[in-house]
Amino acid sequence: MDIQRGRNFLLSPGPTNIPERVLAAMQRQAVELGAPAFVELSRSCLEDLKAVFKTSGSVFAYAANGHGVWEAALANTLAPGDRILVPETGMFSTAWAEMAAALQINVEHIPGDWRHGVDAGQVEERLRADKSHQFKAVLLIHTDTATGLSSDVVAVRQALNQARHPALLMVDAVASLAASDFRMDDWGVDVAVGASQKALMSPPGLGFTVAGSRALEIAASGGGPRYYWDWQRRLSGPSYMWFCGTAPEHLLFALRESLDLIFEEGLEASFARHQYLADCVRAAIHAWSEAGALELNALWEEEQSNSVSTIRVAEGYDAEALIQTCRDRFNVSVGRGLGKLEGTAFRIGHMGDINAPLLLGGLASIESALQICNIPFSSGMPNAISHLSAEQPADA
């Protein structure tokens, strides 16, 4: 029997669940672009995002997804022929590098195995060897949603400093922002990118770049061809130029409400909640793995993300059938394997507007689907319930 009534249990790594307050904030008429109240709302969103990124830099908002703001980051700071260094941690580090190559930027990779985060020692070694400072930027994914890996941004910044290399540090925080601590200024990040549809709990369609002083200085006189993406254009002129034309009003109405929700909870409390619930999911996965057919992709505990867990499925078992069974039989949405993990993994998103009942219902449904698909597992529900029954962290 297919059970499609009631609420879908959305456990994908993005888009994530949208709170009712955020949905309700969009149920209103459009307004005049120059109306003082709308200008102030837009300004407040841009200013308050600084608190989420923990920066005093300039925030730029685009009607775009994460890939769009990747291009904004590249086009404003790098010109055709420039050289960049990209450590490989999963599909999204590879995809950002492919975009750079399409913009005629020369890319050098540090190969990775998709099971470990960035090796800062290798980054430092490559930068020390670059005596003439040909590398103009290092591109880093903080949390890769394909692999469930979170990399150490601070260690990469230290690698740049120890190598005495002037390359910009550019970090994708799309999947980590508001789910894990991200300190743009304290960590020495020159350019950060984010998006609305993950732990910011908003509809897809808004992307953000944040530029520090070094990046803004480079963009003022360099970078590549751009118009819509141009930071300087958005810093000048009337308020509608903040969006290079008509603002995505209803997405901004939603963002304003989601930011209010985040600040009501508190950023530190949000990080603690995400860690607590991510540990619940991993407690279940560790039990599932005892039967030998399933395994958490991220091998080191310190690199297992607060946002998403990627589970590898052993050869001979059908990961795609499991995903389809979750969706069609139980109305539970989990993510597919991506890139090198396509067809051999599934992903559980645990970021944004989530709580324990949502996760417990999702985990129980996944176990039912595992049984239907004849994939061996040991029940993880006792582990998950035991974790949730323990004392919660003070901020959760």
Image: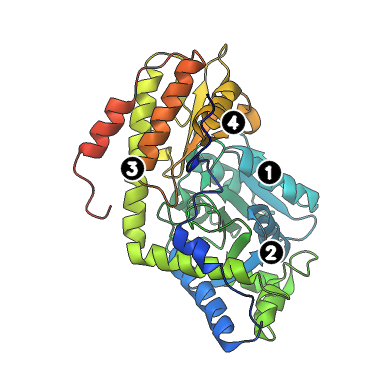
- Residue 341 - label: none
Q: Residues within 10 Å of mark 2 (few under 14, many from 20)?
A: many
Q: Pointers 3 and 4 in contact (CB under 8 A)?
A: no
Q: Point out residue 16 in the picture as x, y percentages from the top left corner.
A: 51, 49
- Residue 77 - label: 2
Q: Pointers 3 and 2 in contact (CB under 8 A)?
A: no
- Residue 356 - label: 3
Q: Residues within 10 Å of mark 3 (few under 14, many from 20)?
A: some
Q: Nearer the viewer, residue 145 or 198?
A: 198
Residue highlighted by disc 1: 95
Q: Nearer the viewer, residue 22 or 391?
A: 22
User: Could you give the CA–CA distance between mark 1 and mark 2, rounded to whole angstroms?
Assistant: 18 Å
The quarter of the displayed image where residue 205 is located: bottom right
Residue highlighted by disc 4: 337
Looking at the rendered image, the disc whose residue lies closer to the viewer, 1 or 3, is 3
User: Could you give the CA–CA distance between mark 4 and mark 1, rounded to whole angstroms?
Assistant: 15 Å
Q: Amino acid at mark 4?
A: Gly
Looking at the rendered image, the disc whose residue lies closer to the viewer, 1 or 2, is 1
- In the displayed structure, would residue 8 be above or below residue 181? above
**Label 1 element class:** helix
User: Could you give the CA–CA distance between mark 3 and mark 2, rounded to whole angstroms?
Assistant: 42 Å
User: Could you give the CA–CA distance between mark 1 and mark 3, rounded to whole angstroms?
Assistant: 33 Å
**Measuring 40% from the left and 64% from the top, which residue is drawn there?**
261
